[in-house]
């Protein structure tokens, strides 16, 4: 599909004090690379939503600057700005009296697109998020499941091909099974559209699963650590981060580390469970435990078995990956 190029986002000394004196964001600086999916995580009330809403100027910062590409958000026309930024919130905010197709067509309508161009775009987007325009396009939001509504929200946010997508707890209102599926689909979608995405969640597992990078925030949006999931899990920089990512850090690290494709051991004959070259160590360990040979075979990119791993090999691979993550990111 055609995509506008994604834009980087830069926050420089951003501050937000609400009129009642509440300091929501004290002094936040961070750079988000074009095309990255960055998860903002932190406890309730730490300022995540405020940060997000300052990026599309729904909230005016009291200090500092935010730029999207070359554009200073403070001086941009807010309406034009918001049309270039997709925004998805928890309960989606679909218009209840408009059909799904009309909801997705909102921004193209505002931009004055022709009916034909709009219809094509609606069909393309509904297809992209796994909905059938013939079946779902003419339904109203209340005739959809929570997960389907969420997909429509994402389709609507992508309609005008925004350079940035902001998402505030987009999947938290759906049940855990639908949520897992939505997360999977969302990752596939992001691989397709390659937007710069800032994603607010209070769920560390979701951040680890979806984020290219994670920004861990504490009170007043203090940036405790900003790095890849592997870096943060391998070496939390502060006690706060260590506690926030949780005691089962080791298991989480297994999930974000892929099996090695070299240095694998020769496999004796036997009915070994198999995993693909891009499987996580967690999947490999789970398969190994389900099998009865004590080994798991790893396939290469051609689908041929490249070698095997024992539980000890998985442990060693995890520690090697941790060392690499830490030395890539000395901070
Ligand atoms: N309009 C407002 N006026 C005064 N204080 C506000 C306002 N909006 C938010 N706050 C306060 O600012 C702080 C940050 O709120 P924010 O909604 O950004 O946090 P959050 O991390 O997104 O929280 P949650 O995870 O619970 O949604 C909180 O202390 C909140 O009470």
Image (cartoon, grey):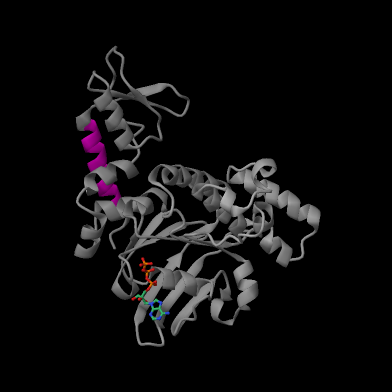
Query: Magenta region's main secondary structure?
Result: helix
Q: Position of residue 103 (x, y in %)?
A: 65, 58
Q: Quadrant of residue 329?
A: bottom left
What residue is shown at x 46% (from left), y 81% (from top)?
A: 61
Q: Nearer the viewer, residue 206 or 232?
A: 206
Q: Position of residue 67 (x, y in %)?
A: 52, 74
Position of residue 170 relative to residue 308, above or below, is: below
Residue 314 sits inside the magenta stretch: yes
Position of residue 214 relative to residue 271, above or below, is: below
Highlighted range, magenta: 313-326
Q: Number of numbered discs present?
A: 0
Q: Quadrant of residue 304?
A: top left
Q: Nearer the viewer, residue 205 or 225?
A: 205
Quadrant of the drawing holding the C terminus: bottom left
What residue is shown at x 19% (from left), y 51% (from top)?
A: 247
Q: Quadrant of ligand 1?
A: bottom left
Q: Position of residue 175 (x, y in %)?
A: 41, 47
Say whether residue 214 is left or right of residue 235: right
Q: Position of residue 146 (x, y in %)?
A: 50, 50
Q: Nearer the viewer, residue 144 or 265?
A: 144
Position of residue 198 relative to residue 286, above or below, is: below
What residue is shown at x 34% (from left), y 44% (from top)?
A: 256
Say whether residue 264 is left or right of residue 59: left
């Amino acid at each position: 599909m055609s995509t506008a190029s994604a834009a980087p986002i830069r926050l420089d000394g951003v501050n937000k004090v609400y009129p009642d004196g509440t300091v929501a964001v004290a002094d936040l600086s961070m750079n988000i690379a074009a095309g990255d999916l960055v998860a903002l995580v932190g406890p309730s009330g730490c300022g995540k939503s405020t940060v997000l809403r300052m990026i599309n100027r729904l909230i005016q910062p009291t200090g500092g600057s935010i730029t999207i590409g070359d554009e200073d958000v403070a001086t941009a026309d807010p309406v034009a700005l918001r049309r270039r930024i997709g925004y998805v919130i928890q309960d989606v905010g679909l218009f209840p009296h408009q059909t799904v197709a009309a909801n997705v067509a909102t921004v193209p309508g505002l931009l004055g697109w022709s009916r034909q161009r709009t219809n094509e775009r609606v069909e393309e987007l509904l297809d992209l998020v796994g909905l059938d325009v013939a079946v779902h396009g003419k339904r109203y939001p209340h005739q959809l499941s929570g997960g389907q509504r969420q997909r429509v929200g994402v389709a609507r946010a992508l309609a005008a091909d925004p350079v940035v997508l902001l998402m505030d707890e987009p999947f938290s209102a759906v049940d855990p099974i639908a949520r897992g599926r939505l997360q999977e689909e969302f990752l596939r979608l992001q691989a397709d559209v390659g937007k710069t995405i800032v994603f607010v969640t209070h769920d560390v597992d979701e951040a680890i699963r979806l984020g290219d990078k994670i920004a861990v925030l504490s009170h007043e949006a203090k940036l405790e650590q900003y790095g890849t999931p592997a870096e943060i899990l391998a070496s939390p920089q502060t006690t706060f981060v260590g506690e926030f990512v949780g005691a089962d850090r080791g298991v989480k690290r297994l999930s974000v580390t892929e099996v090695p494709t070299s240095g694998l051991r020769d496999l004796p004959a036997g009915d070994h469970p198999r995993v693909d070259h891009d499987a996580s160590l967690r999947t490999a360990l789970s398969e190994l435990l389900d099998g009865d040979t004590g080994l798991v075979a790893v396939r290469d990119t051609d689908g041929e078995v490249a070698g095997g791993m024992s539980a000890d090999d998985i442990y060693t691979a995890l520690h090697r990956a941790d060392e690499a993550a830490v030395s890539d990111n000395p901070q």
